[in-house]
Image (tube, rainbow, N blue to C red):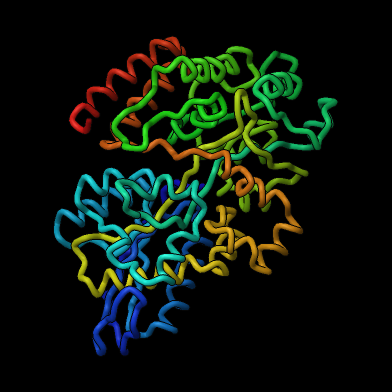
């Protein structure tokens, strides 16, 4: 989806020409040249860079006094490192798409400004309230809005309908509960004459972002991993341990790959029929639609005590060490990028969730979802969704959980011990934020 590494693209020298018209949140001085370097994490390669370049060029045609230059900075992790390094050197981007979970880190580094500083009028306030509430859980804190949802997602389940038929299962009835998932995965698992698995029943990635995929299990087991203030986690909660034990047991029963499962290769394993059911981002929807040579379905994550998934993906942020004019220009660009028609087309082109209900009312997205109903699954899951794990000192607190998950999945610790150790490390890291 989301987060493969790509070649870096150097920024060109910026020369802006023309006059700048007024922004709803405040005037930009006439005859000013406003430069807006824009960091963007590339997640799916060439087509995305062409789309973003096209958006920037289209925006500049109608806003000739603003020069937006997309800078493709690699993965999400690489992009935030570059953005914070640039911030500390005094030369940050004006805006960047970074993970929604980076919000606390960016606030703690005093790197960003809230959008409330620039959104004043009735029309602007309506825009701020136009996004799905689930996406704002990772965008607001302390009564302020720090991020604007753009490249957002949930985790969904994909299944191979042909594999279901071969296993004697109804191809139009995917598992809806943990018990059904385990039962169907057992029937879907294939082995060769030597006993080697050639097709796993289910595959849930555990590299790169294990915590995010794990949240599909903790959420559906009725527990949230962090509080809203971002200073307390529940890694050692009995329901968290139970969720991890379920994941480990899938591997022990040979219906799921043992050990660590690669994030990046999971869609390919699905294409190649090495896995009959996979959990991955809705951001892979267009990728899977274009590459799967068989009929497939998309469904919500199977529940245990409730439905649900974490949200995921990236927000727009505005960096503090840019000028007032640059910040105002960036807000205008972000408002333009998140208009319903553009959000609808972005969803069609990429598979990410359109971030506002209004986008789903556009003729383009109505037609697309009528022709391809799986595109509505992630949207329909939003009322059940929770915030992606995000805390102060987020990278280290999340790493504590990731390390615990991988220890349990590789068998070096029991789920209970792994989560006890992860909780102790998180408590140590968060002590200063209580």
- Residue found 49% across the figure and 18% down from its top: 239
* Residue 434 location (% of width, % of height): 22, 30
**Image point (66%, 46%), residue name:** 377
Most distant residue in the front direction: 122
Find residue 240 and report its horizontal and vertical position in percent.
47, 20
| Residue 190, image quadrant | top right
35 is higher (above) or lower (below) than 6:
below
Please state if 54 lies on the left or on the right of 78 as rendered. Answer: right
Residue appearing at x 70%, y 36% in the figure: 159
Left or right: 70, with 169 as reference point: left
Image x and y of residue 95, in percent: 32, 62
Q: Residue at x 81, y 35 (%)?
A: 171
69 lies above or below 241: below
- Which is nearer the eye, 32 or 414? 32
Quadrant of the rendered image containing residue 252: top right
Of 81 and 294, the residue lying toward us: 81
Q: Position of residue 155 (x, y in %)?
A: 56, 40
The answer, for residue 397, to whether it is visible in the render is yes
Count of picture labels: 0
From this viewpoint, is residue 75 visible?
A: no
Residues 50 and 17: in front is 17
Position of residue 258 in the picture relative to residue 19 (left or right): right
Residue farthest along the left direction in this orientation: 89
Above or below, comparing residue 35 to residue 415 in the picture: below
């Amino acid at each position: 989806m989301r987060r493969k590494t790509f070649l870096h693209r150097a920024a060109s020298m910026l020369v802006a020409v023309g006059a700048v018209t007024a922004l709803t949140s405040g005037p930009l001085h006439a005859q000013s040249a406003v430069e807006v370097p824009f960091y963007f994490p590339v997640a799916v390669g060439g087509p995305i860079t062409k789309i973003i370049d096209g958006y920037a060029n289209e925006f500049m045609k109608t806003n000739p006094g603003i020069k937006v230059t997309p800078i493709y900075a690699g993965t999400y992790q690489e992009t935030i490192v570059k953005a914070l390094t640039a911030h500390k050197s005094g030369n940050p981007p004006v805006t960047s798409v970074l993970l929604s979970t980076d919000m606390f880190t960016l606030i703690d580094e005093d790197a960003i400004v809230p959008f409330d500083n620039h959104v004043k009028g009735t029309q602007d306030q309506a825009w701020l309230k136009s996004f799905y509430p689930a996406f704002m859980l990772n965008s607001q804190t302390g009564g302020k809005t720090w991020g604007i949802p753009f490249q957002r997602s949930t985790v969904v389940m994909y299944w191979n309908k042909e594999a279901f038929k071969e296993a004697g299962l109804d191809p139009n009835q995917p598992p809806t509960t943990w018990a059904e998932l385990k039962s169907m995965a057992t029937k879907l698992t294939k082995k060769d004459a030597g006993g080697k698995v050639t097709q796993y029943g289910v595959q849930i990635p555990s590299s790169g972002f294990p915590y995010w995929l794990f949240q599909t299990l903790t959420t559906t087991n009725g527990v949230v991993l962090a509080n809203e203030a971002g200073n307390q986690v529940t890694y050692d909660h009995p329901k968290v341990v139970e969720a991890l034990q379920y994941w480990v047991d899938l591997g022990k029963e040979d219906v799921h790959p043992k050990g660590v499962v690669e994030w990046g290769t999971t869609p390919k394993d699905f294409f190649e029929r090495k896995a009959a059911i996979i959990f991955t981002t809705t951001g892979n929807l267009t990728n899977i639609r274009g590459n799967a040579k068989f009929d497939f379905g998309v469904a919500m994550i199977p529940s245990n005590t409730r439905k649900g998934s974490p949200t995921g993906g990236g927000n727009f942020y505005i960096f503090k060490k840019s000028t007032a004019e640059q910040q105002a220009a960036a807000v205008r660009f972000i408002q333009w990028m998140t208009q319903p028609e553009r959000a609808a087309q972005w969803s069609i082109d990429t598979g990410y969730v359109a971030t506002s209900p209004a986008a789903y009312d556009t003729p383009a997205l109505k037609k697309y979802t009528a022709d391809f109903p799986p595109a509505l699954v992630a949207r329909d899951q939003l009322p059940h969704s929770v915030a992606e794990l995000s805390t102060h000192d987020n990278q280290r607190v999340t790493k504590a959980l990731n390390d615990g998950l991988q220890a349990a999945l590789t068998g070096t610790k029991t789920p209970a011990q792994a989560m006890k150790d992860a909780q102790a490390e998180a408590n140590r890291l968060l002590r200063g934020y209580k």
